[in-house]
Amino acid sequence: MVDTLQPTTEHAHDDGHDEHHGASGLLNWLTTTDHKIIGMNYTVTSVIMMLLGGAMAMLIRAQLTVPDGGLVSLAKYNELFTMHGSIMIYLFAGPFAFGGLANYMVPIQIGAPDMAFPRLNALSYWLYLTGSITMLLGFFTAGGAANFGWVGYAPLSNSLNAPGAGADLWVGALILTGFSAIFTGVNLVATIFYLRAPGMTMFRMPIFTWNMLVTGILILLAFPVLTAGLVMLYCDRHFGTHIYDANGGGSPVLWQHIFWFWGHPEVYILALPFFGMVTEIIPVFSKKPLFGYKGMVFATITIAALSTGVWAHHMFTTGVVLLPFFSFMTYLISIPTGMKFFNWIGSMWGGQVQFTSAMLFSIGFLLTFLIGGITGILLASPPLDFFTHDTYFVVAHFHSVVIALVIGAMAGIFYWYPKMTGRFLSERLGKIQFWLLFGGGLLFVMPGYLVGLRGMPRRMAVYIIDPTWQNLNIWSSVGGFLMGISMLIFAANALKTMKTPKTAGPNPWDGHTLEWFTTSPPPHHNFYSLPNIKSERPTWDYFHPDAPALTHDDHDPSHVPGAVKADAQ
Amino acid sequence: MNDLANSTESAIAPTSKNRPSRKGLGWIALAIAPILLSGCQIPGFGINQGVTETSHKVYKLWQGFMVTGLIVGGFTFVLIVFAAIRYRRRSNEIPRQTQYNTLVEVLYTVIPTIIVGFLFYFTIVVENPEVALVSNPPAKVKVVAFQWGWRFSYPENPMVTVVGQSTENPELVLPVGETVQLNLSSLDVVHGFYVKEFAFSQYALPGVVNKFDFKATKAGEFQTQCTQMCGLYHSLMYFKVKTIPAADYHQCLTNSTSGKQFIACANNTTTALYHRNTATQGAPVHHG
């Protein structure tokens, strides 16, 4: 079996990873424009950020095991949850997905040698790294790090209420990472539109690439708004512009509008890449094509389009937004999301589902995301949002979603690790990690929902003495600690592979898409040869010419074997 | 949800050999049946009815949403787990490469659309009266939030103003059986006015006055606090809401010459009526 999966045996002597530039070591790393090295840099940096943000979460959960705190002061607690949220959203989830795995995989998946603008890509990474360090430096300033929540609501974030340098570093960091994201968005969109290999039509692109195209477009719509908003915040802080200051004729709610106009598309900028990953993984480990490829593409586009019109559902309780409109738009977004669920189920249906770690994490993603999705529909109803806004119910809701994303990130890592390094992560450790992360995640969010319904507000360093509140918080904390342990197991697993030999081969999972048609890791400029691309599964078609025929309900000529359209861009 | 999962997982094993689809559906129906059958006595799913006319409606809306959510979520959950276990790998044989099924695709687009249509309709039914204001409210209170405390003043008697910072836990007194209108604003940053038993929260914004009505149905005392992150002492920005019979409310207001007197009067008249809510009996902590 493995022998037949060697499309490039004539090149087996080439280990493929070496740069052909002549530069080596540190200099090479500093000056590289290779999307694979930049992608690895992004991935490693963002995973380190996740571990840092996770460590802060551990302190937060430890603080909440007793009502009167005592572990950290009120001031330090505010810094901790602000930086936990900021790191996880701005420095981990997005950069990991669109800077890390997408940067690495998108050019390979479409048969391109690199991103469209390799130097801009390098600039993106260095802006991201600089921004990340800038934000973290806040902890070393006299006034401490930013302490107004990751949403930075005006006027709590103005120079009167947050005078410290930590807040300025936070604003500056977000401007830097904002430009980084915009450049990556430009790069993704240009690469996908212009660098596809001959035969790779739009509707033969891997679904992960589709998701990254839509993510790139969303980045271009959303991030400039946030970056502009942050520049105005900086002007308010230092030049007395009063843009968000009610006393000077400005409006604090304007900040909320600008922030969430970025913030809600951002939710999908974070989620779509992970949707894309599991949509790649589930069909591969079910040995079937994606159930509704085109439906999936249109669902993704619909989600993205709707996501630009729902931002004010974060602002129902401001009393100054049009409730029915934003409520209705939010309900609508659940329809394409539901379609995705049934597509994932349909892809497993009738297949040969193989429970590798990547597949387990993908199923864990579906189940955890399902909980976050259902509670999201509850929150879309303004009367129910009035009831639960700013309580732990909301915290539990979006943690259900983001924990699903972390589980999805793990699915992506376990799936593509052999491609990126040539080595396998330990499946045994992977499965232990899965059950700890999935179980810990559920144990963390479920008591959160309950304590929220019992009235516990979010962002509380101390809380009233109530045995039920405390018990629920302890259970949440235990779940949080289990997730922490699962991440240590992951770190150990990754470090352990450094000593193992490169045994992965080009196509260890019997994959569908082009990245499985090249060596692991791929050579400089990615390919020695490409197969004929005549469906959305070129690698599968190449290795399974005799596979049971694709049966279609509707007859699409592009799926008929042999009907190759000469569509070279 | 857990019950659903357990019953199906155990159910899948015997059915997986032959004709899974029809038997599988039967088991799914069996798993959902307890929820449907308990419909005549729908539980509160973690909340109680609250003490205002609106909170009663919100409670029913919540029940409806939770039942729908559990059915839809449970169905999807069962399908995911069923598909993964039923179609787990048994051989290296390549399965039939099926893709697209127009009927299924239409169903999973249309049915969710109908469901969210209903959810939206019932949302509007509860929401419209909730955010509507009566034109001449018999009682009015002006609520001003600040770092880190609350000021409650009563236009009916300009001498009555109650101010309290953080753990002083100031008291907001409201009438029972009569519509009261609150004017909410903030002196500095954004704060959150939230009363769980009223099933309601609203931002206190600087530069904006938010107005909303309550009609309490029950006398009681409710411990609560600011919900919107507002700086260093956010977690200690407590306040208390007390509802007393409307006649006593107006009498106390008329007879008082200060906020202190008003609170004392409110506390004295109706102690026997208080129905303490056990969920929020906790006392504020004093952080050293």
Image: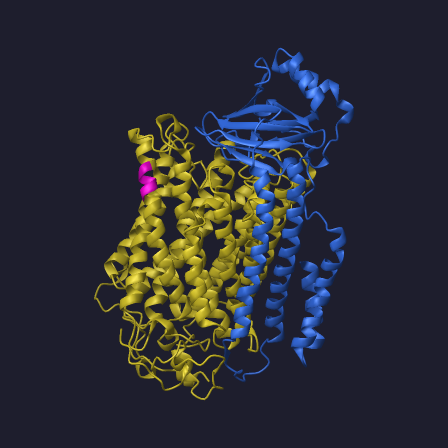
Chain colours: A yellow, B blue
Looking at this rendering, what residue extends furthest in the left direction?
A22
Foreground residue among A403 and B114: B114
Looking at this rendering, what residue extends furthest in the bottom direction?
A546
Q: In the figure, is residue A531 to the left or right of A291? A: left
Picture coordinates of residue A100, whole percent (x, y):
37, 59
Q: Is residue A230 magenta?
A: yes
Q: Residue at x 39, y 85 (%)?
A: A561
Foreground residue among A503 and A113: A113
Foreground residue among A301 and A405: A301
Look at the image and give the residue range highlighted in magenta.
A228-232
Picture coordinates of residue A301, whole percent (x, y):
41, 62
Dominant secondary structure, magenta: helix
Q: Is residue A156 magenta?
A: no
Q: In this orientation, does residue B169 appear?
A: no
Q: In the figure, is residue A9 to the left or right of B262? A: left
Q: Quadrant of the C terminus of chain A?
A: bottom left
Picture coordinates of residue B20, whole percent (x, y):
66, 77
Q: In terms of image quadrants, where is residue A197?
A: bottom left
Picture coordinates of residue A507, whole percent (x, y):
42, 77
Q: In the figure, is residue A286 to the left or right of A544? A: right
Looking at this rendering, what residue extends furthest in the right direction?
B272
Q: In this orientation, does residue B85 appear?
A: yes
**Above or below, B287 relative to B60:** above
What count of labels does the image hold?
A: 0
Q: Residue at x 48, y 72 (%)?
A: A292
